[in-house]
Image (cartoon, helix red, strand yellow):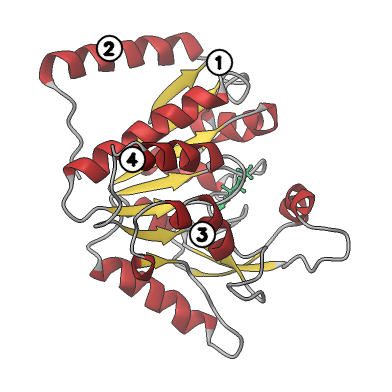
Protein backbone atom coordinates (compact mmCIF):
# COMPACT_ATOMS: atom_id res chain seq x y z
CA UNK A 1 0.00 0.00 0.00
CA UNK A 2 1.15 3.51 -0.74
CA UNK A 3 -0.21 5.81 1.95
CA UNK A 4 -0.06 9.52 1.11
CA UNK A 5 -1.13 12.07 3.72
CA UNK A 6 -2.16 15.57 2.65
CA UNK A 7 -2.89 18.65 4.73
CA UNK A 8 -6.54 18.84 3.70
CA UNK A 9 -9.36 17.29 1.68
CA UNK A 10 -8.86 19.68 -1.22
CA UNK A 11 -5.31 18.42 -1.78
CA UNK A 12 -6.61 14.85 -1.71
CA UNK A 13 -9.03 15.73 -4.52
CA UNK A 14 -6.37 17.56 -6.55
CA UNK A 15 -4.00 14.60 -6.31
CA UNK A 16 -6.72 12.07 -7.14
CA UNK A 17 -7.63 14.16 -10.22
CA UNK A 18 -4.01 13.99 -11.36
CA UNK A 19 -4.15 10.19 -11.26
CA UNK A 20 -7.32 10.15 -13.34
CA UNK A 21 -5.96 12.73 -15.77
CA UNK A 22 -2.76 10.77 -16.25
CA UNK A 23 -4.69 7.60 -17.09
CA UNK A 24 -7.09 9.32 -19.44
CA UNK A 25 -4.47 11.23 -21.36
CA UNK A 26 -2.05 8.30 -21.68
CA UNK A 27 -4.32 5.33 -22.39
CA UNK A 28 -6.24 5.00 -25.64
CA UNK A 29 -9.37 3.39 -24.19
CA UNK A 30 -9.22 3.99 -20.45
CA UNK A 31 -11.59 2.22 -18.09
CA UNK A 32 -12.41 4.05 -14.88
CA UNK A 33 -14.04 2.56 -11.81
CA UNK A 34 -16.13 5.22 -10.07
CA UNK A 35 -17.59 5.76 -6.62
CA UNK A 36 -20.39 7.90 -5.24
CA UNK A 37 -20.74 9.43 -1.74
CA UNK A 38 -19.53 12.75 -0.40
CA UNK A 39 -15.80 12.09 -0.67
CA UNK A 40 -15.31 11.95 -4.48
CA UNK A 41 -17.51 14.98 -5.22
CA UNK A 42 -14.51 17.32 -5.05
CA UNK A 43 -12.56 14.95 -7.31
CA UNK A 44 -15.36 15.13 -9.89
CA UNK A 45 -15.34 18.94 -9.62
CA UNK A 46 -11.61 18.91 -10.38
CA UNK A 47 -12.20 16.67 -13.40
CA UNK A 48 -15.00 18.88 -14.70
CA UNK A 49 -12.71 21.92 -14.32
CA UNK A 50 -9.94 20.17 -16.24
CA UNK A 51 -12.38 19.23 -18.99
CA UNK A 52 -13.70 22.81 -19.21
CA UNK A 53 -10.13 24.11 -19.36
CA UNK A 54 -9.53 21.82 -22.37
CA UNK A 55 -7.00 19.71 -20.50
CA UNK A 56 -8.96 16.48 -20.53
CA UNK A 57 -11.37 14.58 -22.75
CA UNK A 58 -13.49 11.63 -21.62
CA UNK A 59 -14.51 10.74 -25.19
CA UNK A 60 -12.83 7.35 -25.15
CA UNK A 61 -13.42 6.57 -21.49
CA UNK A 62 -15.62 3.75 -20.26
CA UNK A 63 -16.75 3.78 -16.65
CA UNK A 64 -18.07 1.23 -14.19
CA UNK A 65 -19.56 2.37 -10.90
CA UNK A 66 -19.11 0.39 -7.73
CA UNK A 67 -22.71 0.21 -6.68
CA UNK A 68 -26.34 1.19 -7.13
CA UNK A 69 -29.34 1.06 -4.83
CA UNK A 70 -31.95 -1.59 -5.39
CA UNK A 71 -35.57 -0.59 -5.66
CA UNK A 72 -35.23 2.94 -6.99
CA UNK A 73 -35.33 3.96 -10.65
CA UNK A 74 -32.43 5.56 -12.49
CA UNK A 75 -34.35 8.86 -12.70
CA UNK A 76 -34.93 8.92 -8.94
CA UNK A 77 -32.81 11.72 -7.46
CA UNK A 78 -31.42 9.30 -4.88
CA UNK A 79 -30.11 6.85 -7.47
CA UNK A 80 -26.39 6.65 -8.02
CA UNK A 81 -27.03 7.05 -11.76
CA UNK A 82 -28.54 10.44 -10.97
CA UNK A 83 -25.59 11.27 -8.70
CA UNK A 84 -23.08 10.44 -11.44
CA UNK A 85 -24.99 12.39 -14.08
CA UNK A 86 -25.21 15.42 -11.79
CA UNK A 87 -21.66 15.38 -10.51
CA UNK A 88 -19.71 14.27 -13.57
CA UNK A 89 -21.29 12.77 -16.68
CA UNK A 90 -23.52 15.76 -17.59
CA UNK A 91 -20.56 18.13 -17.47
CA UNK A 92 -17.94 16.29 -19.54
CA UNK A 93 -17.78 14.70 -23.00
CA UNK A 94 -18.11 11.08 -21.88
CA UNK A 95 -20.39 8.93 -24.06
CA UNK A 96 -23.22 8.14 -21.65
CA UNK A 97 -23.68 4.74 -23.33
CA UNK A 98 -20.24 3.81 -22.05
CA UNK A 99 -21.10 4.52 -18.40
CA UNK A 100 -22.31 1.53 -16.41
CA UNK A 101 -23.74 0.95 -12.96
CA UNK A 102 -24.68 -2.42 -11.46
CA UNK A 103 -28.40 -1.89 -11.80
CA UNK A 104 -31.02 -4.52 -11.10
CA UNK A 105 -34.53 -3.49 -12.12
CA UNK A 106 -37.69 -4.93 -10.64
CA UNK A 107 -38.30 -8.49 -11.77
CA UNK A 108 -34.69 -9.01 -12.87
CA UNK A 109 -32.68 -11.76 -11.24
CA UNK A 110 -29.97 -10.04 -9.16
CA UNK A 111 -27.64 -13.03 -9.46
CA UNK A 112 -27.80 -12.92 -13.24
CA UNK A 113 -27.44 -9.13 -13.22
CA UNK A 114 -24.34 -9.44 -11.03
CA UNK A 115 -22.75 -11.95 -13.36
CA UNK A 116 -23.65 -9.83 -16.38
CA UNK A 117 -21.92 -6.83 -14.78
CA UNK A 118 -18.78 -8.88 -14.18
CA UNK A 119 -18.88 -9.99 -17.81
CA UNK A 120 -19.28 -6.43 -19.04
CA UNK A 121 -16.19 -5.35 -17.09
CA UNK A 122 -14.23 -8.26 -18.58
CA UNK A 123 -15.34 -7.34 -22.10
CA UNK A 124 -14.04 -3.82 -21.51
CA UNK A 125 -10.67 -5.39 -20.65
CA UNK A 126 -10.97 -4.70 -16.91
CA UNK A 127 -10.84 -1.56 -14.82
CA UNK A 128 -7.61 0.44 -15.05
CA UNK A 129 -8.13 2.71 -12.08
CA UNK A 130 -10.80 2.15 -9.43
CA UNK A 131 -11.77 5.15 -7.29
CA UNK A 132 -12.89 4.21 -3.79
CA UNK A 133 -14.19 5.87 -0.67
CA UNK A 134 -14.40 4.06 2.64
CA UNK A 135 -17.30 3.67 5.06
CA UNK A 136 -16.82 4.44 8.75
CA UNK A 137 -17.23 0.68 9.25
CA UNK A 138 -14.50 -0.12 6.71
CA UNK A 139 -16.78 -0.95 3.78
CA UNK A 140 -15.65 -0.43 0.18
CA UNK A 141 -18.41 -0.29 -2.40
CA UNK A 142 -21.27 -1.66 -0.35
CA UNK A 143 -19.24 -4.62 0.84
CA UNK A 144 -20.20 -4.43 4.47
CA UNK A 145 -18.23 -6.11 7.28
CA UNK A 146 -18.36 -9.94 6.94
CA UNK A 147 -18.44 -9.67 3.12
CA UNK A 148 -16.46 -12.44 1.52
CA UNK A 149 -13.05 -11.23 0.44
CA UNK A 150 -13.64 -13.32 -2.71
CA UNK A 151 -17.04 -11.75 -3.46
CA UNK A 152 -18.28 -10.68 -6.89
CA UNK A 153 -21.04 -8.27 -7.96
CA UNK A 154 -24.20 -9.15 -6.06
CA UNK A 155 -26.91 -7.87 -3.70
CA UNK A 156 -25.86 -6.69 -0.25
CA UNK A 157 -27.99 -5.75 2.70
CA UNK A 158 -26.76 -2.49 4.21
CA UNK A 159 -25.85 -2.41 7.88
CA UNK A 160 -27.66 -0.17 10.33
CA UNK A 161 -24.49 1.92 10.67
CA UNK A 162 -24.35 2.56 6.92
CA UNK A 163 -28.07 3.35 6.84
CA UNK A 164 -27.58 5.82 9.69
CA UNK A 165 -24.49 7.36 8.08
CA UNK A 166 -26.32 7.85 4.77
CA UNK A 167 -29.65 8.95 6.24
CA UNK A 168 -28.31 12.55 6.13
CA UNK A 169 -28.87 12.39 2.37
CA UNK A 170 -32.57 11.44 2.57
CA UNK A 171 -35.56 13.56 3.56
CA UNK A 172 -37.62 12.24 6.46
CA UNK A 173 -40.49 11.04 4.24
CA UNK A 174 -38.22 9.69 1.51
CA UNK A 175 -37.69 5.95 0.87
CA UNK A 176 -34.16 4.95 1.88
CA UNK A 177 -33.18 1.68 0.23
CA UNK A 178 -31.72 -1.01 2.49
CA UNK A 179 -30.42 -3.16 -0.37
CA UNK A 180 -27.86 -2.43 -3.07
CA UNK A 181 -26.05 -4.13 -5.89
CA UNK A 182 -22.30 -3.78 -5.44
CA UNK A 183 -19.09 -4.91 -7.07
CA UNK A 184 -17.57 -7.56 -4.84
CA UNK A 185 -14.23 -7.31 -3.10
CA UNK A 186 -12.63 -9.63 -5.66
CA UNK A 187 -14.08 -7.44 -8.43
CA UNK A 188 -12.42 -4.39 -6.86
CA UNK A 189 -9.12 -6.24 -6.42
CA UNK A 190 -9.11 -7.06 -10.16
CA UNK A 191 -8.60 -3.37 -11.03
CA UNK A 192 -5.05 -2.59 -12.14
CA UNK A 193 -4.81 0.32 -9.71
CA UNK A 194 -7.06 1.27 -6.82
CA UNK A 195 -7.15 4.80 -5.45
CA UNK A 196 -8.91 5.14 -2.11
CA UNK A 197 -9.77 8.61 -0.84
CA UNK A 198 -10.59 9.18 2.82
CA UNK A 199 -11.15 12.51 4.52
CA UNK A 200 -12.34 13.57 7.93
CA UNK A 201 -12.06 12.31 11.46
CA UNK A 202 -15.04 9.93 11.12
CA UNK A 203 -12.93 7.74 8.83
CA UNK A 204 -9.82 7.60 11.07
CA UNK A 205 -10.57 4.26 12.74
CA UNK A 206 -11.56 2.56 9.48
CA UNK A 207 -8.37 3.88 7.86
CA UNK A 208 -6.29 2.51 10.73
CA UNK A 209 -7.99 -0.89 10.43
CA UNK A 210 -7.50 -0.90 6.66
CA UNK A 211 -3.81 0.04 6.69
CA UNK A 212 -2.49 -1.41 9.94
CA UNK A 213 -5.09 -3.92 11.05
CA UNK A 214 -5.27 -7.61 10.21
CA UNK A 215 -6.62 -8.74 6.87
CA UNK A 216 -10.19 -9.38 7.88
CA UNK A 217 -13.69 -9.57 6.44
CA UNK A 218 -14.69 -7.38 9.41
CA UNK A 219 -12.83 -4.52 7.69
CA UNK A 220 -13.46 -5.13 3.97
CA UNK A 221 -11.03 -2.35 3.00
CA UNK A 222 -8.20 -4.35 4.60
CA UNK A 223 -8.42 -6.58 1.49
CA UNK A 224 -6.53 -3.78 -0.29
CA UNK A 225 -3.44 -5.00 1.59
CA UNK A 226 -3.51 -7.80 -1.00
CA UNK A 227 -3.50 -5.41 -3.95
CA UNK A 228 -0.28 -4.77 -5.84
CA UNK A 229 -1.12 -1.14 -6.63
CA UNK A 230 -3.26 0.32 -3.85
CA UNK A 231 -2.85 4.05 -3.29
CA UNK A 232 -4.44 5.54 -0.19
CA UNK A 233 -4.96 9.30 -0.24
CA UNK A 234 -5.76 10.77 3.18
CA UNK A 235 -6.18 14.14 4.76
CA UNK A 236 -4.65 14.70 8.20
CA UNK A 237 -7.89 13.99 10.03
CA UNK A 238 -8.46 10.62 8.34
CA UNK A 239 -4.81 9.71 8.98
CA UNK A 240 -4.90 10.82 12.61
CA UNK A 241 -4.99 7.31 14.10
CA UNK A 242 -2.11 5.95 11.99
CA UNK A 243 0.99 5.41 14.09
CA UNK A 244 3.63 5.39 11.33
CA UNK A 245 2.84 8.72 9.70
CA UNK A 246 6.47 9.81 9.59
CA UNK A 247 7.40 6.66 7.71
CA UNK A 248 4.61 7.23 5.16
CA UNK A 249 5.81 10.79 4.51
CA UNK A 250 9.39 9.62 4.17
CA UNK A 251 8.49 6.72 1.86
CA UNK A 252 6.40 9.06 -0.27
CA UNK A 253 9.33 11.47 -0.62
CA UNK A 254 11.51 8.58 -1.78
CA UNK A 255 8.87 7.68 -4.39
CA UNK A 256 8.79 11.26 -5.63
CA UNK A 257 12.58 11.17 -6.04
CA UNK A 258 12.45 7.89 -7.98
CA UNK A 259 9.72 9.35 -10.21
CA UNK A 260 11.79 12.49 -10.79
CA UNK A 261 14.79 10.43 -11.80
CA UNK A 262 13.12 7.72 -13.86
CA UNK A 263 9.77 9.26 -14.82
CA UNK A 264 6.30 8.41 -13.65
CA UNK A 265 5.38 4.88 -14.59
CA UNK A 266 1.96 3.38 -14.17
CA UNK A 267 1.41 0.01 -15.76
CA UNK A 268 -2.15 0.39 -17.06
C1 LIG B 1 -20.14 4.70 -2.83
C2 LIG B 1 -19.48 3.65 -2.07
C3 LIG B 1 -19.25 3.75 -0.61
C4 LIG B 1 -18.71 5.09 -0.16
C5 LIG B 1 -18.55 5.13 1.36
C6 LIG B 1 -18.08 6.47 1.85
O1 LIG B 1 -20.24 4.36 -4.20
O2 LIG B 1 -19.16 2.69 -2.67
O3 LIG B 1 -18.36 2.73 -0.23
O4 LIG B 1 -17.48 5.32 -0.77
O5 LIG B 1 -19.76 4.83 1.96
O6 LIG B 1 -19.07 7.42 1.60
P1 LIG B 1 -18.80 8.98 1.88
O7 LIG B 1 -17.79 9.40 0.87
O8 LIG B 1 -20.14 9.61 1.64
O9 LIG B 1 -18.32 9.09 3.26
Residue depicted at x 27% and y 56%? 59
Question: In the rendered image of this protein, does residue 101 appear above or below residue 207?
Answer: below
Element carrying mark 1: loop
Q: Are marks 3 and 2 in contact (CB under 8 Å)?
A: no
Q: Is residue 68 left or right of residue 77?
A: left
- N-term-proximal mark, 1 vs 3: 3
Q: Secondary structure at mark 4?
A: helix
Q: Check disc 3: other Cα within 10 Å, few if <14, some if 14-19, many if 20+.
A: some
Residue marked by disc 1: 243
Q: Which residue is mark 4?
A: 20
For marks 3 and 4 on the same chain, the one whose residue lies earlier in the sequence: 4
Reading the image, the residue beneath label 3 is 85
Marks 2 and 4, Cα distance to the nearest angstrom?
Answer: 22 Å
Label 2 or label 1, whichever lies nearer to me, is 2
Q: Work out whether residue 229 can be spotted.
A: no
Of badges 2 and 4, the one in the foreground is 4
Judging by the rendered image, the residue that carries numbered circle 2 is 254
Pointer 2 local density, CA inside 10 Å: few below 14, some 14–19, many at least 20: few
Q: Is residue 89 above or below residue 134?
A: below
Distance of label 2 from label 1 (alpha carbons)? 19 Å
Ranked by sequence position, the earlier of labels 2 and 1 is 1
Could you tell me how far apart the alpha carbons at marks 3 and 4 are, in whole angstroms?
18 Å
Amino acid sequence: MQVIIFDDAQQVAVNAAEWVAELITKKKNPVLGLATGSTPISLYQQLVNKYKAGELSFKNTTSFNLDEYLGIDADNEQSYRHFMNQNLFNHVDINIDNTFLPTCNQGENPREQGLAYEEKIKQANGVDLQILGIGANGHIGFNEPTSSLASRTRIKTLTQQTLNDNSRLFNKDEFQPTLAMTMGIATILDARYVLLMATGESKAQAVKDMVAGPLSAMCPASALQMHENAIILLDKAAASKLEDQEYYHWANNQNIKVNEEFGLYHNY
